[in-house]
Each structure stands twice: as structure tokens, then as C-alpha cells.
Amino acid sequence: MNPLYPVIAACPACHGRLEWDARGAGCGCVACGRVYAVVDGVAWMRLDATGAPLRPAPPSPRPPVTALRRLSAATTPPDFAYKTHPSRRRIPLFVEHLGPDATILNLGSGRTTFGPRVVNLDIGPLSAVDVVAVGEQLPVQSASLDGVITQGVLEHVPDLPATLAEIDRVLRPGGLVYHEAPFIQGYHASPNDFRRFTAVGMRELAPGYDVLEQGVAVGPSSAMMWIASEYLALLFSLGNETLLKVGRRGFPWLLSPLKFADAWLEGHPRADLIASAFYIVAQKPAV
């Protein structure tokens, strides 16, 4: 677990102060009495439907490695998004801009990591995750963060207004948010996929904030590759589910070279018309 997390941690139910076990086995809320576990260095701060702390399930045995599983792994489709060098550098520069003493939350981190000043939070214990929680109930003290990062996350949260309200709560006055969200992308459930955002719509992710920077995060060529791959898979499936699965693996490989045109098309002045994804950097008012 990132050592920054206990410093900013709070009960996700009541935002009360937490007392941490000296052995690092968990923590308890001094206000409501809820007890949270730490398993393999990951703090479990999710609540179930009744409001009780969610306990991690025992690890499932790994399925045997078969020839079919090897084939499936070998034919995993390439990433639909081509990230240019400026796009790849955008979040590291955001972290660097906040300074060496900043405390930053990577909300919906997946397997990404952006350095020791960034606490990684996700709904499950993926590699590099420090905290298991949800965006609608952040286990973080109010006004304790200098920055929040969301990358390909806000389309998946069930309650977007609640998540944005929580981000606003945990940010200090003058703190920064970096949001990256899809515009033209195929459906991708993780575990659900609820919404898309236009360039104008991105501003609604930081209501009342000062927009410092905004633009295309993933270009039109990536959008073209994604949609064309899914379209051709549907077209040639003839309504057969097996053929559809084969096409969804094969056509992305066939069309993958298309996405590299974003090396120049991403900078087109009207790339926003059919971009795959947008980003926005915004600052919370100081008062």
C-alpha cells in the first residue's frame, strides 16, 4: 500500500477518522465503528448493499492452462487506442506539475501507476492498486488531495453525479482534476458502460471549475479502427455468435495499422468531430 494513503484515509460510510492496526492488518472508524481489512497490502474500503465493509473473497484456483487458453491469449486483439507521445506524456506532466509534495488520487487506476505521490484506487485488487473502493464513496478525507486523475473511468461509474461530488469533496481548494473520457468508442463493459462525452460535454465533468486545458486524448483514426472492426465483425458474423467472436479478434489485427494515422491526424484542428476520446484539466476554485 502506498504510505500516503493512511494519511488521507477516511471511512467511506461516514468520512470519520480511521485508526490503523499497528500490524498493518486493517483499520477501524472511530465515528461509526466499521472495521476494514488490509489484505496483501491492499486496503479494502468498499461497502456492500447494506453498508457493511466488503470482505475480500478467497482467491479462486487458477484454471489449467490448455491449448485453447493459449490460443485465446495469443489472439487477444490489439489496443484500439493509439496514444501519441504527447498523449502518453500528459498524465505524467500533470503529476509533475503538482509538485514533489502533492498527494494525488488515481481513481479507477486499473494497472496504471504514475509514481510515489499517486494513490491508486479501483473497484478490485488489480496489480498496483492500493485501495479497493468505488467512486461514489471515496474513502478519503475531505479537502485532502492536490489532484485527482480519471482515465477511461467515468463512462463506467453507475452514479456519475455522486462520483463528481465525491471528487469535489476530496479536492483541496485550488486542486486540479484530469479527466479523460471516450467520445467515439465501441461498447466496452468493465463491468458496465453507461455513457460517452462530446468535447463540450467534457466541461460538465468539472462544473464550476476553471478549465485550464482541453483537447483530444485519442484521435479519429483510433475511433475509425474501433468502429470499423466491430462493424465488420457484425457484418460477417451472419448472426452467428461464434463467427462474431472470431471477427472481433481478427478484424482489429487486420485494421490495426489505421490507428497510427493519429500521429498526424490527432493534431488536426477539427479532430474533435470524430475523436475517440477527450481530456480536460480543470482547477477547483480557491475559495
Image (spheres, helix red, strand yellow):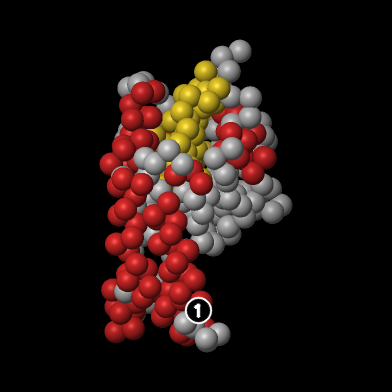
Q: Position of residue 102 (x, y in %)?
A: 40, 23
- Residue drawn where x is 37% and y is 44% of the image: 266
Looking at the image, which is closer to me, 208 or 145? 208
Q: Is residue 198 visible?
A: yes
Compared with 137, 284 (above or below) is: above
Residue at the limit of the structure toward the front, as seen here: 269
Query: For residue 118, what is the image quadrant?
Result: top left
Q: Is residue 147 visible?
A: no
Compared with 211, 27 (above or below) is: below
Compared with 182, 202 (above or below) is: above
Which quarter shows the N terminus? top left
- Residue drawn where x is 43% and y is 38% of the image: 269
Q: Position of residue 55 (x, y in %)?
A: 55, 54
Horizontal arrangement in the rendering, residue 273 relative to residue 115 (left or right): right
Horizontal arrangement in the rendering, residue 236 relative to residue 3 (left or right): right
Residue at the limit of the structure toward the top, as seen here: 287
- Residue drawn where x is 53% and y is 26% of the image: 211
Residue at the limit of the structure toward the right, as seen here: 50
Disc 1 is placed on an element classified as helix
Looking at the image, which is closer to me, 278 or 59? 278
Looking at the image, which is closer to me, 8 or 30? 8
Q: Position of residue 38 (x, y in %)?
A: 46, 46
Q: What's the amino acid at mark 1? A: Leu
Looking at the image, which is closer to me, 148 or 230? 230
Horizontal arrangement in the rendering, residue 76 relative to residue 210 (left or right): left
Compared with 255, 242 (above or below) is: below
- Residue drawn where x is 32% and y is 71% of the image: 254
Count up the numbered dots: 1
How many other residues sit within 10 Å of disc 1, few (<14), some (14-19) or many (≥20)? few
Residue bearing the label numbered 1 = 235
Which quarter shows the C terminus? top right
